[in-house]
């Protein structure tokens, strides 16, 4: 799992956003071929036409797309694989809650294991943010 987090950290905010958006609207789909502690192999479909092979292991993170070949840093397919694997591994009570300065979480969780004080707009792009917190924050009138 450490590979996933370190790979994700190298993804530019722009690619991170595109990966999150693609997963959300299903223009990017991730099919896991193999997942072990040592290695993750996945196929990422980009729309209907293209399919790329992604491998993440000790040696690094590789994608078969042209973007990964010509540009530095992980591409959005790699980002999409990291995000979706982390999401699948996420336990419901292991979310990061958004905490107000007074110590209250947005969703009302009294003893959050993980929380984020002084969060930024970036919270919307993180896969393991508590969905209830996110909803209450983005829809304050509905709370
Ligand atoms: Zn790629
Ligand atoms: Zn919460």
Image: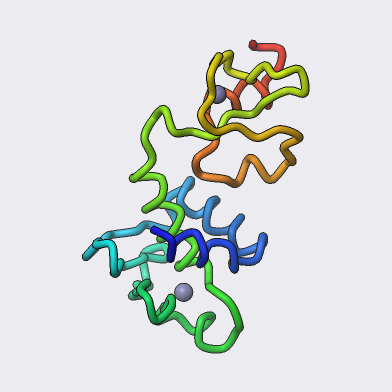
Tell me if residue 17 comes above or below residue 55 in the rendering: above
- Protein image colouring: rainbow
Position of 138 compared to 84: left or right?
right
Residue found at x 37% / y 53%: 85
Position of 53 compared to 105: left or right?
left
In which image quadrant can residue 120 be found?
top right
Residue found at x 34% / y 72%: 51
In which image quadrant can residue 134 be found?
top right
Residue found at x 60% / y 84%: 71
Position of 120 compared to 130: left or right?
right
Residue found at x 54% / y 36%: 129
In which image quadrant can residue 40 be found?
bottom left
**Residue 58 appears at what percent x and percent y?**
37, 76
Tag count: 0
Most extreme residue toward the bottom, as rendered? 70
Where the N terminus falls, by quadrant? bottom left
Position of 71 compared to 32: left or right?
right
**Residue in front for this viewpoint, 95 or 17:** 95
**Residue 26 appears at what percent x and percent y?**
42, 50
**Residue 46 appears at what percent x and percent y?**
42, 66
**Residue in front for this viewpoint, 141 or 102:** 102
Where the C terminus falls, by quadrant? top right
Ligand 2 is found in which quarter of the picture?
A: top right
**Residue 73 appears at what percent x and percent y?**
58, 77
């Amino acid at each position: 799992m450490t590979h996933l987090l370190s790979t994700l950290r190298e993804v530019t905010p722009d690619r991170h956003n595109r990966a999150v958006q693609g997963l959300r609207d299903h223009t990017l789909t991730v099919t896991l071929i193999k997942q072990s502690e040592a290695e993750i192999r996945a196929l990422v479909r980009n729309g209907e036409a293209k399919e790329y092979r992604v491998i993440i292991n000790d040696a690094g993170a590789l994608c078969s797309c042209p973007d990964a070949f010509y540009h530095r840093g992980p591409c959005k397919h790699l980002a999409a694989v990291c995000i979706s694997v982390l999401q699948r591994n996420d336990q419901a009570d292991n979310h990061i809650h958004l905490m107000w300065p007074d110590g209250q979480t947005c969703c009302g969780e009294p003893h959050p294991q993980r929380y984020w004080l002084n969060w930024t707009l970036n919270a919307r792009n993180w896969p393991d943010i508590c969905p209830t917190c996110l909803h209450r924050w983005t829809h304050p009138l509905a709370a």
